[in-house]
């Protein structure tokens, strides 16, 4: 009986401790990102939205701005934590005791790159799985790059991003 209780307790700890990392640049966070975060949250006890510090990319928003925008949007979702990282994603995942990395797939064109990254991450760290999630169909065409271009040209992005992000984009491209 004691062995059964210990086994059940260990299983319970496993399920309670399930944690996933959803990495990205989030420059800016879109409704598609938020949809993937909410989907991941249904599968994992905790989701860490990890903002990558990538000096090779020219970001519109500073790292701090991206973290703040995520805290104001995704950070309001229960059991979602916002963090920053640099270096190898799998090392960050291990340090955070995460068992999975969440990657959003919008279209078949995303798959090849994401598949290569997933295989490399598996080679680097066998204990971290990659889970691919698709956003709702209405968000499959969204990308931060396209949204920034629409905003830069004065277009309405209100149906693509949370209001706080729309306001921040307007501030960046005020004429």
Image (cartoon, rainbow, N blue to C red):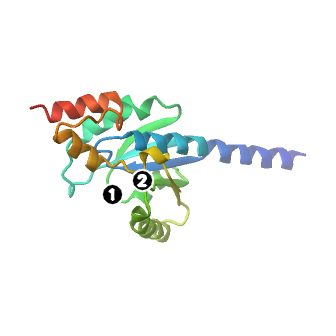
Dots 1, 2 in contact, CB < 8 A? yes
Quarter placement of the C terminus: top left
Instruction: Locate residue 89, reporting x and y percent.
Output: 40, 57
Judge from the rendering whether residue 99 lies leftward or rightward of residue 50; answer left or right: right
Q: Mark 2: few, some, or many residues within 10 Å (few <14, many ≥20)? A: some
Picture quadrant where residue 2 is located: top right
Position of 55 relative to 32 (above/below): below
* Residue depicted at x 56% and y 62%: 127
Q: Is residue 10 visible?
A: yes
Determine whether the residue tagged by mark 1 lies in a helix, strand or loop: loop
Position of 164 relative to 143 (above/below): above
Judge from the rendering whether residue 66 lies leftward or rightward of residue 118; answer left or right: left
Residue under label 1, please give it. Answer: 87
Q: Mark 1: few, some, or many residues within 10 Å (few <14, many ≥20)? A: few
Judge from the rendering whether residue 78 lies leftward or rightward of residue 150; answer left or right: right
* Residue depicted at x 40% and y 50%: 23
């Amino acid at each position: 009986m004691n062995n059964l209780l210990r086994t059940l307790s260990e299983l319970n700890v496993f399920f309670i401790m399930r944690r996933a990392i959803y990495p990205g640049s989030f420059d800016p966070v879109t409704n598609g990102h938020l949809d993937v975060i909410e989907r991941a949250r249904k599968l994992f006890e905790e989701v860490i939205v990890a903002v990558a510090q990538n000096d090779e990319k020219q970001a519109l928003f500073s790292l701090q701005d991206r973290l703040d925008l995520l805290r104001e949007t995704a950070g309001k979702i229960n059991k979602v934590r916002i963090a920053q990282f640099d270096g190898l994603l799998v090392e960050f995942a291990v340090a955070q005791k995460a068992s999975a990395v969440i990657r959003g797939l919008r279209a078949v064109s995303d798959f090849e790159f994401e598949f290569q990254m997933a295989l490399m991450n598996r080679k680097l760290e066998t204990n971290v799985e990659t889970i691919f999630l698709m956003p709702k169909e209405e968000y499959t065409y969204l990308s931060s790059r396209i949204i920034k271009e629409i905003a830069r040209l004065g277009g309405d992005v209100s149906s693509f991003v949370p209001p706080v992000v729309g306001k921040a984009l307007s501030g960046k491209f005020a004429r």
